Image (cartoon, rainbow, N blue to C red):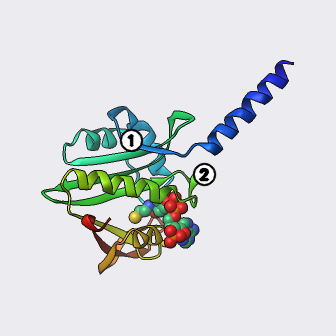
Amino acid sequence: MALFARLKQKIAAVLLRKKTSPFVRPAQQNDAPLLSALYAEGGFSSSWTIAEFEALLADRAVIADVLCDPARPARLYGFSLSRSAADEAEILTIVLSKSVRGRGWGRVLLHQHATRLAAFGIATLYLEVEEDNRPARALYEGMGFETLGKRPGYYKKRDGSTAHALVMRCRLDRL
Ligand SMILES: CC(C)(COP(=O)(O)OP(=O)(O)OC[C@H]1O[C@@H](n2cnc3c(N)ncnc32)[C@H](O)[C@@H]1OP(=O)(O)O)[C@@H](O)C(=O)NCCC(=O)NCCS
């Protein structure tokens, strides 16, 4: 009987998760450990420590948003973090957990993040992306980012090779 009740509970949790969509909220200082763990899933050559995220989140020029699971609000699916200067900002990073990529949630997160940046008076958003990063480029191009130029050999990879970076820009009044 107890087993049956537990099974029913699990099914209800799955159905609830299927019905509900993730939501985006501003990042908080105590999100730093989860942001560091998510960043490690990004496949980047560098790692950012919890202390580095704490410092970023304490910086008034930094605007960060997280994507949450409505059924388990303590669980984060991804985040996006930008640094602003006057009416411009640069996306320093955006990462989704490997387990939820390709569901359109990266677009949800980036759109909400850009909307919040615009509300802070940011008119132009910049970023750098590895030329071969197809999912990220599809995400940015779909949001209206245009390529301004290329930085040859900009990224140094863990195996010693290099990769080109594309510099992209999006005018937020077009969102
Ligand atoms: C880049 C990233 C945030 C995209 O998030 P996501 O949730 O997987 O993306 P979405 O499902 O919202 O899809 C966004 C677009 O990318 C496309 N896309 C998704 N996965 C793709 C893949 N493997 N190959 C090609 N295009 C892909 C989608 O079709 C969609 O484009 P469309 O709207 O034109 O159809 C995610 O893949 C990620 O965290 N990657 C690792 C970290 C990273 O590279 N960050 C970017 C640093 S610049």
Per the image, the residue denoted by label 1 is: 25
Q: Amino acid at mark 2?
A: Ser
Q: Residue at x 19, y 48 (%)?
A: 61
Mark 2 to mark 1 CA distance (whole Å): 20 Å
Horizontal side, residue 117 vs residue 86: left or right: right
Label at residue 162: none
Farthest residue in the left direction?
Answer: 86
Residue 62, position as x, y percentages in the image: 24, 48
Horizontal side, residue 73 vs residue 113: left or right: right
Observer-nearest of 6 and 95: 6
Residue 13 appears in view: yes
Q: Quadrant of the C terminus?
A: bottom left
Per the image, the residue denoted by label 2 is: 99
Q: Residue at x 27, y 48 (%)?
A: 63
Q: Secondary structure at mark 2?
A: helix
Observer-nearest of 144 and 48: 144
Would you place residue 160 above or below residue 17 in this image? below
Q: Residue at x 24, y 38 (%)?
A: 58
Observer-nearest of 156 and 131: 131
